[in-house]
Image (spheres, rainbow, N blue to C red):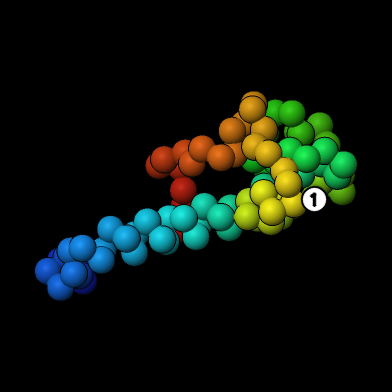
Amino acid sequence: MLRNARVEAVGCENFPTLQQAKLRLRYDEMQVAVVPGITRYHKSDCQLIRFLSADDLDVMTKRAATEAGCVPCKACKPDQVASGATSG
Ligand SMILES: [Zn+2]
């Protein structure tokens, strides 16, 4: 609490940018699952890949998946960050 108050007081313009950068970094580093040979990435709990075992999936960061040319699955929408479901 005290630390946040101080940050706002010192640089209220920088703070939102830093927050966004952190969120974006976290977003890029989100783990997604890719079925080898299919350029689509999923959340790890996507219903479309639930029947696949871990051996059948490539788990990587979202950044790595997009750089590999993968697009977000339309079912589980891994490109949309769910709010309030994060831990730690
Ligand atoms: Zn999916």
Residue 62 picture location, percent across and down:
63, 51
Q: Residues within 10 Å of mark 1 (few under 14, many from 20)?
A: some
Residue farthest to the left?
Answer: 9
Residue 67 picture location, percent across and down:
69, 54
Determine whether the residue tagged by mark 1 lies in a helix, strand or loop: strand
Q: Can the viewer see residue 33?
A: no
The part of the image, by quadrant, that contains residue 74 is top right
Q: Is residue 4 left or right of residue 75?
A: left
Residue 9 picture location, percent across and down:
12, 69
Q: Please report the residue visible at 70 percent of the width from the left and 28 percent of the height from the top.
A: 47
Residue 64 in the image: above or below residue 80 = below
Q: Is residue 79 left or right of residue 53?
A: left
Q: Please report the residue visible at 59 percent of the width from the left and 39 percent of the height from the top.
A: 78
Q: Can the viewer see residue 19?
A: yes
Q: Please report the residue visible at 47 percent of the width from the left and 39 percent of the height from the top.
A: 82
Q: Is residue 25 left or right of residue 9?
A: right
Q: Is residue 1 left or right of residue 62?
A: left
Mark 1 residue type: Asp
Residue tagged 1? 58
Q: Please report the residue visible at 52 percent of the width from the left and 52 percent of the height from the top.
A: 27
Count of number-bearing discs: 1
